[in-house]
Image (tube, grey):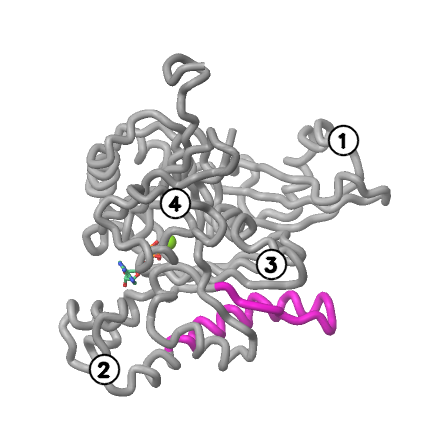
Amino acid sequence: MGGMGFFGRKRTSVGLDIGSGFVKIVEIDHSGDQPEVVRIAVRPLLPDAIVEGEVMDPGLVADTIRGLFEELGVTGGRVVTAVGGHDVIIKKIEMDRMKESDAREVIRWEAEQHVPFDIKSVELDFQILDPEGEGLQMQVLLVAAKRELVDNKVSLLGDAGVSPTIIDVDAFALHNAFSHNYPEGMQGIVALVNIGHEVTNVNILEDGIPILTRDIPFGSRRVREDLQRERGLTSEQAEDVIQGEESIPDLAQFVEHSADEVAVGVERAAAFLMTQQAGVGLGRIYLSGGGSRIAGMAEALARRMNVETQVMNPFERVPVRPDAAVGVPIDDTAPMLALPLGLALRRL
Ligand SMILES: Nc1ncnc2c1ncn2[C@@H]1O[C@H](COP(=O)(O)OP(=O)(O)OP(=O)(O)O)[C@@H](O)[C@H]1O
Ligand SMILES: [Mg+2]
């Protein structure tokens, strides 16, 4: 079969992550034996266009997204993006065992008991975690997102001239990126900690299943502002320190303080878990997001939590075509690309 026509067409997915610091795109070609990254692009957002996950300036964000797609010449392909934050609930629940099609009929009623939002205003999805199980009860992972959040995302993308095929959930995208790259992390309890520009997402997995997600209002922006205020650095100098291009005396002490905030958030999330299952501890922490690049962050967190901590490489087991990154130093940005990579890995 030739390169033309339907069967020769490339099957790609474009993962679009709209962060408060950077808009990020990863495009994956699914036509080969294994997924391959064919394009990577990031573009900074102007400060305060998005604040703590909330889009304050939709026009500007839409322009940034449109610019990125145009620059890359991304026209076709499925675009997968996600929603996250406080208006998304992910919860493991138990319900009477039944077929998936039957569960779909009653899930709204079940969800009503678990979701603290007006059930009429949410989009629901679920997954049966033990479809082969035989007990009277089955374990179900329930996801509820406020409909407004999804609608706003679709309309933002519409303004940017993009029509998304799938709206995923941030935590699942991160999980997806992780499970592809670290199959060994699918056992025991691990925490994925994505330190972004303004928000740190904590995602606790038990045997590969996301059982708890939480957002901490902490990110590299705060570190930058602290460096500016307490060390009299300019914003550019502080950013250079964060990105490891410059160092200052006592940086370690500084980072220790930041790691402490992250640790408190992880501990709170994990404490909830420990009370349920005595004796089962957090086995490992995998860091991602731009904030994971702060020199000494992984080490400080490991010390503070007394848990082995490593920075996650989203391309550990996903090959990247040599010309994929357009003006992006891939080693430096890799930890920021876990989420968009996880989105682009979605097939269908
Ligand atoms: N090489 C790099 N290029 C750009 N930013 C970097 C780099 N290394 C570290 N950073 C830091 O990472 C931050 C962006 O991280 P990331 O892309 O994970 O955040 P975000 O997704 O935009 O934000 P959030 O998820 O909090 O809304 C930047 O603000 C910067 O301080
Ligand atoms: Mg982010």
Q: Which residue is mark 2?
A: 248
254 relative position to 30: left or right: left
SS label for mark 2:
loop
Residue 155 lies in the magenta-colored region: no
Are the residues at dot 3 and dot 2 in contact (C-beta closer than 8 Å)?
A: no
Which is more foreground, mark 4 or mark 1? Answer: 4
In the image, residue 253 lies at what x, y percent?
Answer: 34, 85
SS label for mark 4:
loop
Q: Residue furthest front?
A: 1
Q: Nearer the viewer, residue 122 or 273?
A: 273
Q: Nearer the viewer, residue 266 or 107?
A: 266
181 relative position to 130: left or right: left
**C-alpha separation, residue under disc 2 versus residue under disc 1:** 60 Å
**C-alpha separation, residue under disc 1 versus residue under disc 3:** 30 Å
Q: Earlier in the sequence, mark 4 or mark 1?
A: 1
Q: Is mark 4 within 8 Å of ligand 1?
A: no
Q: Main secondary structure of the magenta part?
A: helix
Q: Earlier in the sequence, mark 2 or mark 1?
A: 1
Amino acid identity at mark 1: Lys
Q: Which residue is mark 3?
A: 185
Q: Which residue is mark 4?
A: 320
Q: Which residue is mark 1?
A: 99
Q: Earlier in the sequence, mark 4 or mark 2?
A: 2
